[in-house]
Amino acid sequence: MSNPFTSEQHALLRLLFLAGPQAEDEIPCKCARGDLLKIGLVGRFAGQTFLTKMGIDVAVSRNLHLEKAVTDFRRTARFILVSDDAGHSYVIPEDRKDDWDTWRFGCGDDAGDGPMFAVRVEGEMTFTLPVVAGVPVIETLNRQGEWR
């Protein structure tokens, strides 16, 4: 695909797509914003710069949605290995650690196989490479920064 955008314009398009509306002092290149504003890809309101519907469509056509999916996945899909007092191991979402501690110190081993959000593991674990929007996460992360 030919690149009709300068690197500054692409960087702003990427920033707004991945991070959402930005305040005036967060815009890295005011000239790029002016250019994208003229062609209708960004808008401004109440001191914020944001992507228009057309800007979102252009970002998606440039595969920025894949990077966003991976970024969102990495932000939310973190797991940790924990153990109960009987030595059983469980995999739990990292953001449920407080719930794990409540279960463990509340009813712990008397509750059977652990809380519903925990997956009990015995012996070896096998992991499958996660895929987001048809793209392996590891491959996508290695290519981060190459979105053009």
Image (spheres, helix red, strand yellow):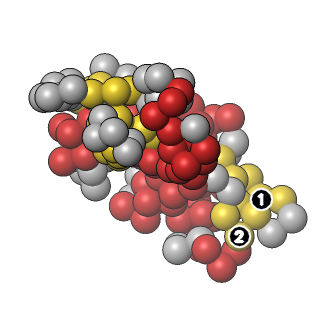
Please state which of residues 96 and 88 is positioned toward the viewer in this rendering: 88
20 w.r.t. 68: above or below: below
Name the foreground residue: 20 vs 12. Answer: 20
- The residue indicated by pointer 1 is 44
Earlier along the polypeptide chain: callout 1 or callout 2? 2
Q: Quadrant of residue 30 in the image?
A: bottom right
Q: Is residue 54 above or below residue 81?
A: above
* Tag 1: amino acid: Arg
Q: CA distance from mark 1 to mark 2?
A: 10 Å
> How far from the left and from the top, in percent, is residue 128?
20, 24
In this picture, is 34 found above or below 65? below
Disc number placed over residue 23 in the picture, else none: 2
**In the shown orientation, is residue 41 left or right of residue 145?**
right
Residue found at the far right of this picture: 46
> Helix, strand or loop at disc 2?
strand
Q: Can residue 52 be seen?
A: yes
Q: Is residue 146 toward the left or the right of residue 35 in the image?
A: left
Location of residue 45 in the rendering, given as x and y in whole percent from the top left corner: 83, 59
In the image, what residue occupies the spot 53% across and 73% down?
Answer: 29
Few, some or many residues within 10 Å of mark 1 (<14, 14–19, 20+): some
Q: Nearer the viewer, mark 1 or mark 2?
A: 2
Q: Quadrant of residue 99?
A: top right
Residue 39 visible to an observer of this rendering? no
The residue positioned 68% from the left and 35% from the top of the image is: 53
Depth check, front residue: 16 or 54: 16
Rendered-image quadrant of the N terminus: top left
Q: Whole-percent x and y of residue 81?
A: 31, 44
Which residue appears at 30% of the width and 35% of the height?
88
- Residue at the farthest left position: 124
Q: Position of residue 37 (x, y in %)?
A: 66, 55
User: Quick one: 7 or 134, which is closer to the camera?
Assistant: 134
